[in-house]
Amino acid sequence: MKQKSVLSVKTMPRANRHFLPDYLWHITHRCHQRKFLLKFARDRRRYLHWLFEAKKRVGLSVLNYMVTSNHVHLLVKDTGPNVIARSMQLIASRTAQEYNQRKMRHGVFWEDRYHATAIDLDEHLHRCLVYIDLNMVRAGAVKHPSERAHCGYSEIQKPRERYTIVDLPKLSELCGFRDVATFQQAYRQWISEALSREIGGRDERWSDAIAVGDFTFVDKVKSELGFKTVHRRLMEVTGT
């Protein structure tokens, strides 16, 4: 992928969850005090179970995901009023409830708010996908996302016959490809190119900004959110 400049609207430290219809959103949700409450595979599997249930029950369109030991990344498409809010409530509450019952625990499981960043199409979407799937590579836990069981990369490359989470046809279309096979090949190449470069640390634009994209897109999101972005500022940053 060619490197292009990225514009983002920076947000205040407190996370936000304001949604606009028909946008793509990168959602980040952290465990309370960044504790490793998802460190066991069984708990990460249960999170994915409820992510699938949100897709089935509420109609959430999931394009990618990553479940780590203390936070999750979701790339979703807004498909209707309150779909994202209802889905996140279902996933977060059921995951926490099951964990606390199993551990006979009464503490808070999640941070009080998840954060949502609107993502532009084209190169911005491509880079967001790669950023999500390289999360555990940046953490030094794996050398390639295919080694991580609880992320979208493996499902994108080898779709499941049952309990499918990623809407692969929609993802392929949004990334500009007419068929899934061509997209899968291109995505493997994007990951390889990213791994061939030096993998940096956390890039706060993808998880802290209100919107990431070209100037027109970011300015449109800022305008539509109105007063909610009064204290936000536009930044232009080169590279991924």
Image (cartoon, grey):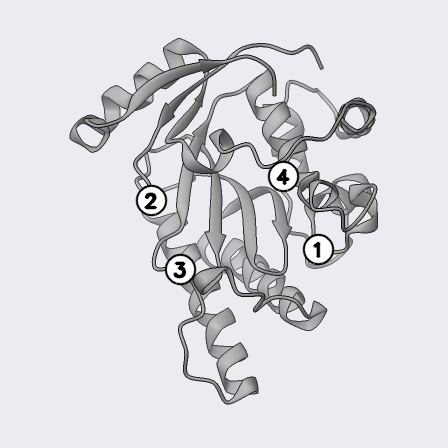
Q: Which residue is mark 1?
A: 150
Query: The residue under label 3 is which amino acid type?
Result: Glu
Q: Name the residue rendered at 83%, 24% in the picture.
A: 196
> Which circle's residue, 1 or 3, is located before the other in the chain?
3
Q: Earlier in the sequence, mark 1 or mark 2?
A: 2
Task: Give the mark nearest the N terminus, 3 or 2.
Answer: 2
Q: Secondary structure at mark 4?
A: helix
Percent x, y for residue 46?
61, 69
User: Which labelled disc corresponds to residue 111?
Assistant: 3
Q: Residue at x 59, y 30 (%)?
A: 128
On the image, which quarter does residue 126 sit in? top right
Residue type of the residue flagged with mark 1? His
Element marked by disc 3: loop
114 up-or-down from 105: above or below: above
How far from the left and from the top, in percent, is residue 133? 69, 40
Mark 2 = which residue?
Answer: 17
Could you say which is closer to the camera, residue 131 or residue 50?
Answer: 131
Q: Earlier in the sequence, mark 4 or mark 1?
A: 4
Q: Amino acid at mark 2?
A: Arg
Quarter assignment of residue 44: bottom right
- Which part of the image, by quadrant, shows the N terminus? top right
- Residue at the disc numbered 4: 132
